[in-house]
Amino acid sequence: MRIPFTKMQGAGNDFVVLDETVHRWGLTAAHYRYLADRHFGVGADQILTVRPSPGPEADFEYIIHNADGGEVEHCGNGARCFVRFVREQGLTDQAVVRVKVRHGVIELRMNDDGRVTVDMGAPVFEHARIPFVADGMAPVTINDWQKWPLALAGIDDSALVSVLSMGNPHAVCLVADVDTAPVASVGPLIESHAAFPNRVNAGFMQVLTPTHVRLRVFERGAGETLACGTGACAAVVAGIRWGVLTGPVDVDTHGGRLTIDWAMGGPAGLQAPVLMTGPATTVFRGDIELPAL
């Protein structure tokens, strides 16, 4: 089976984008893994699929598969690429697009400067909805919010993290220097920790100023990526709740800069939406022959 695709990237987080607005390709998890494979396929952190909206509340449906073939709830950098894709492909001429994801509808806006702003919705802190199981842990409370000590196999010190969901689960910890942070060794241990029934994205944040941070994220099902949009949102939300950040915050990743704003001090309080602004770029288009998998 031969299918067309578009390769895109947002702050170095790269994607294969598929158009299923007219025809469903019927791909399996093995096909998504093949597409993401950097030696035999196209190569990507995630596979994004554009589908017609199932209802009047949105303009399109947005499906995300990680490089391991598993479907996930959300991808912020992918959302920015999504709106550029549907506009470049002539699927819409709207500057503002509403898109259905697994747990709701998000709003995407193409700005005059070419960057894209995504209304990521409000962060979720309820443990059952993340999900997070804190049984047996004794938290440290900061500004009426908890940091949880995760015991990690083979490591003497626990990882002190705050947990939340930005449509997908995140555990955020502070580090003195992201360049020397043990992302490759500790990231997988946090990702697969038993406290997270659906696994988790592990964020390592270095605070430079109250409006500027550096971030690395070990993504669930993908490993460390050059940037993670929902991870940047989660890190900034955590920093604001800890009292060390004030929005808007510039988040520097290996792949580029994202700007995150969360008006926790406004009338909506903790239910205020998180706004993410950053680049979205088309790299190339092509066709690929998929084997029978």
Image (cartoon, rainbow, N blue to C red):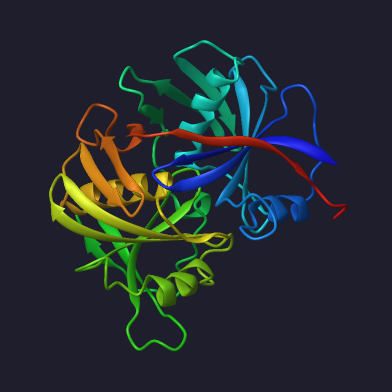
38, 70: nearer the viewer: 38
Query: Measuring 73% from the left and 29% from the top, which residue is drawn there?
Result: 20
Q: Toward which corner of the image does residue 172 lie, by quadrant?
A: bottom left
Residue at the (39%, 86%) spot, across then down: 155
Out of 10 and 284, give the one closest to the viewer: 284
153 sits left or right of 27 in the view = left
Residue 113 pos. (x, y %): 30, 22
Q: As drawn, which residue projects farthest toward the right?
A: 292
| Residue sitting nearer the eye, 109 or 171 | 109
In percent of width and height, residue 110 lies at 40, 20
Tell me if residue 100 comes above or below residue 220 in the rendering.
above
| Quadrant including the N terminus | top right
| Residue 274 image position (x, y, % from top left) | 34, 35
Q: Is residue 125 visible?
A: no
* Count of marks placed on residues: 0
Instruction: Give above or below for 92 relative to 36.
Output: above
Left/right of residue 50 with respect to residue 152 in the rendered view: right
Q: Is residue 93 visible?
A: yes
Asked if residue 96 lies left or right of residue 148, the reply is right
What residue lies at 46% left-to-right and 48% top-to-bottom?
13
Where residue 88 sits in the image (x, y, percent)? 54, 20
Q: In the drawing, does residue 6 fall left or right of residue 157?
A: right
Vertical placement of residue 5 versus 197, above or below: above
Find the residue positioned furthest to the left.
Answer: 209
Q: Quadrant of the C terminus?
A: bottom right
Image point 84% across, 52% down: which residue?
Answer: 291
